[in-house]
Image (tube, grey):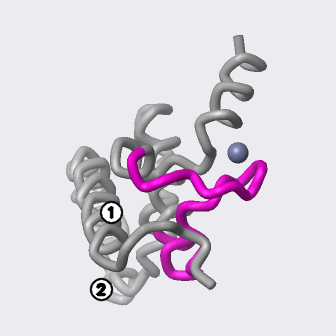
Amino acid sequence: MNATELSTEELESLKDSLLLQKGSILNKSHEFIAEQSSISGAGDEAEVASQDVANNISIHLHERDRTALYAIERALGKIAEGTYGQCESCSEIIGARRLQARPFTALCIECMEEQEALRH
Ligand SMILES: [Zn+2]
């Protein structure tokens, strides 16, 4: 049984938009990447896993972008596992409409509102 109520097409388009958002965040760190590669110099260092690169880059991102980047990575991981679209807190289905508005959301609307209430 599929955890999501998303069609394959919807899932693919959400995955595309996650990858696009991830790319645009990482592009902001373009200068940082250039700097790093000139520092490390040696060609062997170029074989760093992309996950490590993302982690290193994220240190230099603004808090909001960093949070978004981790959420995107998590969402992509969940797509791979087949658990995407399920609320992390109550395990309810989040819903296609909400996911399309916020593809990397990890919580259903009820749990999100609960968390926001706790935060303020
Ligand atoms: Zn929930």
**Residue at the image position 51 percent from the left and 81 percent from the top:** 80
Residue ranking furthest to the top: 120
Verify whether residue 83 appears in magenta. yes
Q: CA distance from mark 1 to mark 2?
A: 35 Å
Question: Badge 1, how many Cα within 10 Å: few under 14, some, many 20+?
Answer: many
Over which residues does the magenta segment extend?
A: 76-97
Within 8 Å: ligand 1 and the Cβ of disc 1? no
Badge 2 residue CB within 8 Å of ligand 1: no
Dividing the image into 4 quarters, which one contains the C terminus?
Answer: top right
The kind of residue tagged 1 is Leu
Residue at horizontal 29 percent and vertical 86 percent from the top: 43
**For numbered disc 2, what is the local secondary structure?**
helix
Ligand 1 located in image quadrant: top right
Q: Circle 2 is placed at which residue position?
A: 43
Residue 102, x across and y down, in percent: 40, 44
Q: Pointer 1: what residue?
A: 14
Residue type marked 2: Gly
Label 2 crowd (10 A; few <14 / some 14-19 / many >=20): few
Front residue (pair 61, 106): 106
Answer left or right for 53 relative to 32: right
Magenta-colored segment: predominant secondary structure: loop
Q: Dividing the image into 4 quarters, which one contains the N terminus? A: bottom right
Question: Is 115 in the magenta?
Answer: no
